[in-house]
Amino acid sequence: MPPPKPSPLPEIAAIDARSFREEIACGYAPVVIRGLVRDWPLVRAANASAQAGRDYLLQFDSGARAEIFVGPQAMKGRFFYAPDMRGFNFERQQGSFAETLRYLAELADRDDAPHLYAGAVETGNALPGFAEADPLPLVEGLGAVRRVWIGNRSIVSAHFDSSDNVACVAAGRRRFTLFPPDQAANLYIGPIDNTMAGQPTSLIDFAEPDFDRFPRFREALAAAQTAELEPGDAIYIPALWWHHVEALSAFNILVNFWWADSPDQDARFEAMVYAILAISHLPPERRQGWSALFDHYVFKRHGEPAAHLPPEHHGPLGKPTPRLRHYVKTFLARGLQRP
């Protein structure tokens, strides 16, 4: 039986910042925004040639360094684990962002090119002035951090980010395949403490999925959504949505914008890991008991858990404030010091 095919991602035309926040971001569902940055000077330059795109970015270069992933042709662009899963099928190198960009543009015409990928480079440090020359009003006021990703043909396995994300394709074509958070069990996730770039990833080779080893992946595909983006297009990816990203061209530039929804955002994954240590090994009936408490206090399945208490007795259940955050962190620190 052939596997299910992902459905097309919803698409909209360019949208203003207020409508984006009220209609898109609040809906917690991904969407492709066609032509959002088609007028960026970077997009126009890169459409002319890889060299023109390179030269446009280099005019902003500050001499910053970047972490670079380099892999052989045999990996077919899929940055992944080594067979024993102790290491990886690529090397990590440190180098000049500018020299990497120059080398990447030279590789665009070579059939024997190694696979090259440098990501998450903050443009405020590496490319000062770029944000002003190529603005994105859509995310103004959100505190978004602009980052640039460069590479040739590559495959980034399905993973999630803790931040909401607007990713803009500036050069090359990219295919995005997204899965809602509830598909995590069907994506056969790798180690959470030994990752390629910080987040755990799916072990499935989407080009040749092994349905005998990963049978539930069929269910994930049935829930998947996909789209191919051209230069100038963008995609909104909500936090925790799994996304598998394929760079399809010999020269690719992506500019993305991550923003935090609260000061507690980065602590959530660590909170989950500690809950795994403290709860996941209990017998089923005891896990169910803790699940009921999490549903009550954390996920609020039955409404506000402190609604019947006077505000002065809400404690950790109160509205997050700097003072409450300090109190809770102190409370947790005392507990974590226990053997």
Image (cartoon, rainbow, N blue to C red):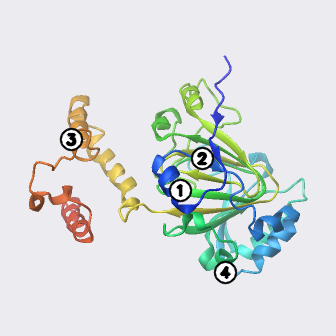
Looking at the image, is mark 4 or mark 1 nearer the viewer? 1
Residue 90 position, x and y percent, is 68, 55
Of the image marks 3 and 2, the number of the one nearer the N terminus: 2
Quarter of the figure with the N terminus? top right
Circles 3 and 4: CB atoms closer than 8 Å = no
Specify the amino acid type for callout 4. Answer: Gly
Viewer-nearest residue: 293 or 285: 293
Task: Please name the residue that numbered disc 2 is placed on.
Answer: 31
Q: Is residue 305 above or below residue 316?
A: above
State how far apart marks 4 and 1 are (Cα).
27 Å
Classed neighbour count for the residue bearing mark 2: other residues with Cα under 10 Å, few (<14), some (14–19), many (≥20): many
Q: Is residue 105 visible?
A: yes
Of the image marks 4 and 1, the number of the one nearer the N terminus: 1
Specify the amino acid type for callout 1. Answer: Ser
State how far apart marks 3 and 1 are (Cα).
37 Å
State how far apart marks 3 and 4 are (Cα).
50 Å
Looking at the image, is mark 3 or mark 2 nearer the viewer? 2
State how far apart marks 2 and 4 are (Cα).
29 Å
- Secondary element at image label 3: helix
Specify the amino acid type for callout 2. Answer: Val
Task: Please name the residue that numbered disc 1 is placed on.
Answer: 19
For residue 129, which numbered disc appears in the image?
4
Viewer-nearest residue: 25 or 221: 25
Tell me: 238 left or right of 225.
left
Residue shown at the point (77%, 64%) measured from the top left: 43
Of the image marks 3 and 1, the number of the one nearer the N terminus: 1
Circles 4 and 1: CB atoms closer than 8 Å = no
Task: Please name the residue that numbered disc 3 is placed on.
Answer: 293
Quarter of the figure with the C terminus? bottom left
Classed neighbour count for the residue bearing mark 1: other residues with Cα under 10 Å, few (<14), some (14–19), many (≥20): few
Classed neighbour count for the residue bearing mark 3: other residues with Cα under 10 Å, few (<14), some (14–19), many (≥20): few
Q: Quadrant of residue 279?
A: top left
